[in-house]
Amino acid sequence: MGRTVLPTVPLGWVTVRISSGRGDGGEEWVSLSRAEASALGEALLEQARDL
């Protein structure tokens, strides 16, 4: 996990690569709207708080 600095221009879509991290080629790309990306971010933060 890293930190990303987003551009100051409004974003229409966010593209995310999801990978197993095992180097086995198991990866997918998904494009999310701003609302979907925000909801995903909130869900990830909520899960991280429980760790």
Image (cartoon, rainbow, N blue to C red):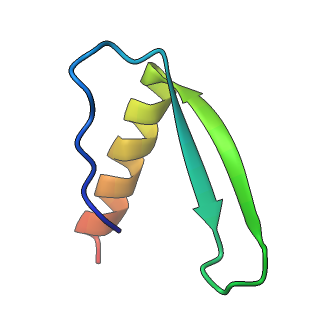
As rendered, which of 38 and 20 lies closer to the eye?
20
Residue lying at 35% horizontally and 68% vertically, measured from the top left: 1
* Residue 7 x/y as whole percent: 26, 27
* Residue 33 x/y as whole percent: 53, 22
Q: Quadrant of residue 45?
A: bottom left
Residue lying at 69% horizontally and 48% vertically, measured from the top left: 29
Report the side of 46 relative to 36 (left or right): left
Residue 33 sits above or below residue 41 on the image: above
Residue lying at 23% horizontally and 65% vertically, measured from the top left: 49
* Residue 6 x/y as whole percent: 27, 34
Residue lying at 77% horizontally and 83% vertically, measured from the top left: 24
Q: Residue furthest right?
A: 25
Q: Quadrant of residue 40?
A: top left
Residue 12 sits above or below residue 47 on the image: above
Report the side of 28 relative to 17 (left or right): right
Q: How many marks?
A: 0
Residue 24 sits above or below residue 19 on the image: below
Quadrant where the C terminus lies? bottom left
